[in-house]
Image: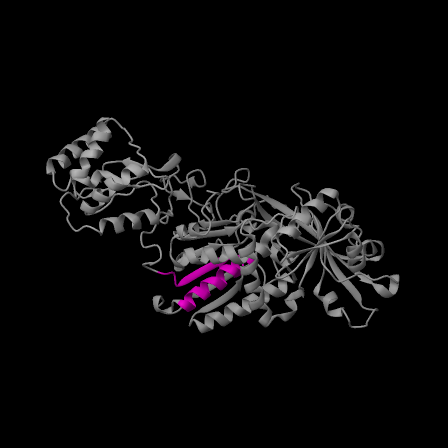
Amino acid sequence: HRHHRMFDNSLNLKTDPLCAKKLNTNAQMIRASNFRILLRLSSCLPIMYNVAGSMGGLYATINPGARQIQLMRSMGSRNDNHHLTRAMGAFCCISMPGFVRCRLPQKNPSGENVYQPKAPNNKRSISMMSGNVNEDKLQPQTQSENIAIIGGGLAGLSVAYHLLDASKNSQDNLSNGLQIKIYDKAEVGEGGASSVAGGLLHPFSPRGKLIHFGLPALEQSNLLVEKAAIHQPLCLIRPQLYRIALTLANVSQLQETAAKYPDLAKWMSQEEISTKLGAQSMGGLELRNGCRVVDVPLYLKGLWEECNKKAGEANGSITWEVIRSTQEDPDNYPSTKRHNPFSAMDFSKYDTVVLSAGSGILTDNLIKCDEEHPPFPVHLVRGQSMEMSFSQRESNESIVNEAMLCGKYISPLQSSAVLEGSNEPNKRQKFVVGASHEFQEIPLTPSELADELKSRSYSLAPHLWDNGTIDRLTMGVRVQSHRGKFGRMPIIGRYSMLEGQYETAADGSAKYDDSIVHPNLWIFTGLSSRGMIYHALFGKWLADAIVNNNEEVVREHFDGFDWWK
């Protein structure tokens, strides 16, 4: 009751200076007894309106949101009568659930009031950029002009494209144009998990459910694919793909998908699937209208050419540098740490560094971490696929050049797509069959891999397995995030080294070995098997955050983007 009377009296602060003195005294008593006052937002709005109107400034609580600061500023700007600035300095702003927290400011050596938030969970950030809210969220004070991106796969090139796109639209904020340099261990489209990805672009889970952000992600990915196709038209293999039902449960799930999303999914009966695809099934879906099959290496090359075009239009530049590792071992298990091939590089000359090297972030020791306790909730998963060829002349059978999936997938390679309608039966059709999902240290042998893939995909293309030839194996290591409220989501945001992730030298300073350390370090990983659907949308959000120098910009699109922290 005493505290409620205190806030009731605050309604008369403008006209009764004695109330302000009493209120300040009470606030000191509350701080001394370590009380935290929680009131309903509905009962606080009139109070905070009057308080904000008389305040000269606000003291934010721990990690206040930009919307809160702007809200309080707008409230304060509606009244020019500033009678009680120091008296009301003890009060904070409104938090998102609608509560008020009371705290007194501390004084620095100059006598000015400052607020010093307590470090959460005793994890002290040693990064100069801790990710706190920038009050001028959409009006960045300084914009990065010199950016390094480590890893030029789906994630890295997506971020690069959207950074250049943003710089083209805001050239007034850049003195010399945006300068981007991409570091990778291979040429464009030739390295990492992205270069061996299946390229099946669609927004549905194996059970036919629409994944989180599925529709906007599909739209954004198609925008980039169309841009890349201008330079590499052969990156488009098929304008549709097929999800096959092999059980009664699959039938029910996929029929429900067709009913919910008729523009994207069309149900096909068992007879229709057999006639069109030659697959043994209980029916399936034709995924269309933006769902397509993409040759990922060609797509990456096309996107790289589009980035060069945008850089020229924005009076900037983008370059690619291949960094060779002297300790590279293609058969090395994902969890085995290797020497950081970028350790000799000087990244201090860059305003911003983006880590988008996929599994290399961990396996190449780009950031300091313990193998058994990675810095974010992920697993490294090895995926192996088989490239197979098939000659119609040799088998007197035919295989439709279409992509089909049912947990595993069979998809035509670009050479097969070109052959369609060529009347050259002596030429061999080529397909990729994938992919394994391996957590164990020792990879599957070729025979073990063939047995696993065949057992899961034989019904899709029996002629291929009976008469085809295995040409080669491909392997990539994916970063798979832990499953959460919205499924497996990518990891994006500002990255700060925390206690427990670095060693301490004898002089007490931080010791990072050969890990990359930068005051403005960002990360984009965890795409796993959803690289094609998620890379464009999340790359755009991360680019927006980098341009505004504030990761809270991402929260406007994805409130839980920092789940991994």
Please state which of residues 446 and 200 is positioned toward the viewer in this rendering: 200
- Residue 344 visible to the viewer: no
Part of the protein shown in magenta: 143-169
Q: How is the image coloured?
A: one colour
- Residue 142 place in picture, x, y as percent: 33, 60
- Residue 505 place in picture, x, y as percent: 40, 40
- Residue 133 place in picture, x, y as percent: 35, 49
From the viewer's perspective, is residue 556 above or below residue 400? Answer: above
- Residue 314 place in picture, x, y as percent: 43, 71
Q: Does residue 163 show up magenta in the picture?
A: yes
Left or right? Give the position of 217 relative to 565: right
In what quadrant of the picture does the N terminus appear? top left
Residue 32 in which image quadrant? top left
Q: Does residue 465 show up magenta in the picture?
A: no
Count how many numbered circles sit on residues in the image.
0
- Residue 181 visible to the viewer: yes
Q: Residue at x 41, y 57 (%)?
A: 546
Please state which of residues 305 and 338 is positioned toward the viewer in this rendering: 305
Q: Residue at x 24, y 30 (%)?
A: 4
From the viewer's perspective, is residue 20 above or below residue 147? Answer: above
